[in-house]
């Protein structure tokens, strides 16, 4: 299941990268009419950041090292 999630994040990263590419080349203007060139620029930056975050999520390690004593301490504080 974890590999399927990571593949999904990688696919989303590629899709966002493609959207950023067509935004940068101006081909997206056939589909979306932006009110200002700055809006188009901000959209391109947001999709680039989204692709970067998706790739980081896809290729990062999900194991978080934590001690059993700390887990018990947090459990006791919550009660």
Image (cartoon, grey):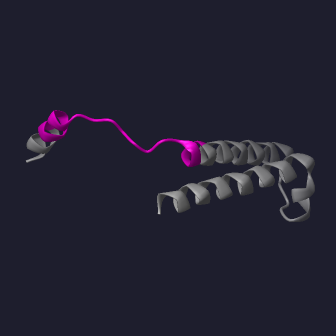
Q: Quadrant of residue 32?
A: bottom right
- Is 44 left or right of 79, judged from the image as shown? right
Q: Position of residue 10 (x, y in %)?
A: 64, 53
Q: Is residue 61 magenta?
A: yes
- Where residue 36 appears, as percent x and y from the top left, is 84, 48
Q: Is residue 69 magenta?
A: yes
Q: Residue at x 36, y 39 (%)?
A: 64
Q: Quadrant of residue 70 in the image? A: top left
User: Which residue sits at x=55%, y=46%?
Assistant: 57
Q: Position of residue 56 (x, y in %)?
A: 58, 42
Q: Nearer the viewer, residue 8 or 74?
A: 8
Specify start and end residues of the magenta stretch as a single range: 56-73
Name the residue: 60% across, 60% down: 8
Taking 23 as reference, is 52 left or right?
left
Residue, x 56% and y 55% (percent of image)?
A: 6
Q: Percent position (x, y) of residue 14?
A: 72, 53
């Amino acid at each position: 299941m974890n590999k399927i999630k990571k593949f999904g994040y990688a696919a989303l990263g590629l899709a966002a990268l493609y959207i950023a590419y067509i935004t940068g080349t101006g081909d997206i203007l056939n589909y979306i009419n932006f009110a200002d060139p700055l809006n188009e620029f901000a959209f391109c930056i947001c999709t680039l950041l989204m692709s970067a975050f998706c790739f980081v999520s896809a290729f990062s390690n999900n194991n978080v090292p934590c001690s059993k004593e700390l887990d018990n301490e947090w459990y006791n504080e919550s009660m």
